[in-house]
Image: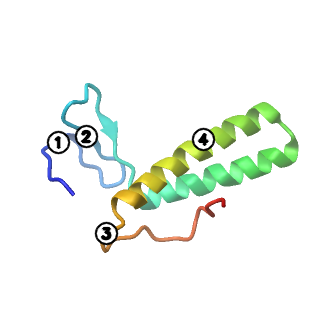
Amino acid sequence: MEMLELEVFSQDRNMAVVRLPGRRTPGSVVPADSLRHLCFLAESIRDRVREDHDRDLGDDAQELYELLLARLRAFEEATRDLTYAPSGTFPRFPG
């Protein structure tokens, strides 16, 4: 882990906005438990859309799910040595 100074635009505990050194644009910090919930919702939408056979919507839902899941996995990998772990059991990781 590395300690950095960040530009902080908002310290809202669930929707902080910061700019990392070297970045032109600020970013939104998504807490792990919120990210896990977003993954669960995207997975649920994807599964329900598949049942309705709307291929374009299903493809968009799949892409959203994969992007959120990749961020959650990156978080978990980056924090695997810390004692903190996001709560909850979602999403169900495929394979």
Distance Cα–Cα, label 1 vs label 4: 28 Å
Q: Compare marks 1 and 2 and give the one earlier in the sequence.
A: 1
Q: Quadrant of the C terminus?
A: bottom right
At 39% from the left and 50% from the top, the residue drawn is: 30
Q: Quadrant of residue 21?
A: top left
Question: The residue under label 2 is which amino acid type?
Answer: Val
> Which badge, 3 or 4, is on the more N-terminal residue?
4
Instruction: Measure the alpha-carbon separation of dots 3 and 4.
Output: 28 Å
Q: Which residue is mark 3?
A: 81
Q: Position of residue 75 (x, y in %)?
A: 40, 55
Q: Image check: 29 left or right of 6?
A: right
Q: Which mark is residue 64?
A: 4
In the picture of the structure, the residue carrying the numbered disc 2 is 18
Q: Residue at x 46, y 48 (%)?
A: 71
x, y percent for residue 4 = 14, 47
Q: Are marks 4 and 2 in contact (CB under 8 Å)?
A: no
Image location (x, y in percent) of residue 73: 47, 55
Q: Looking at the image, how many numbered discs can be counted on the residues?
A: 4
SS at mark 2 in the image: strand
Quadrant in which residue 60 is drawn = top right
Q: Residue 6 got which mark?
A: 1
- Nearer the N terminus, badge 4 or badge 2? 2
**Would you say the residues marked 2 and 3 are in contact, meaning their CB atoms lie under 8 Å apart?**
no
Query: Do labels 1 and 2 touch, CB within 8 Å?
Result: yes
Which mark is nearer the camera, 3 or 4?
A: 3
- Amino acid type indicated by mark 4: Leu
Cα distance between the residues tagged 4 and 2: 23 Å
Amino acid, disc 3? Asp
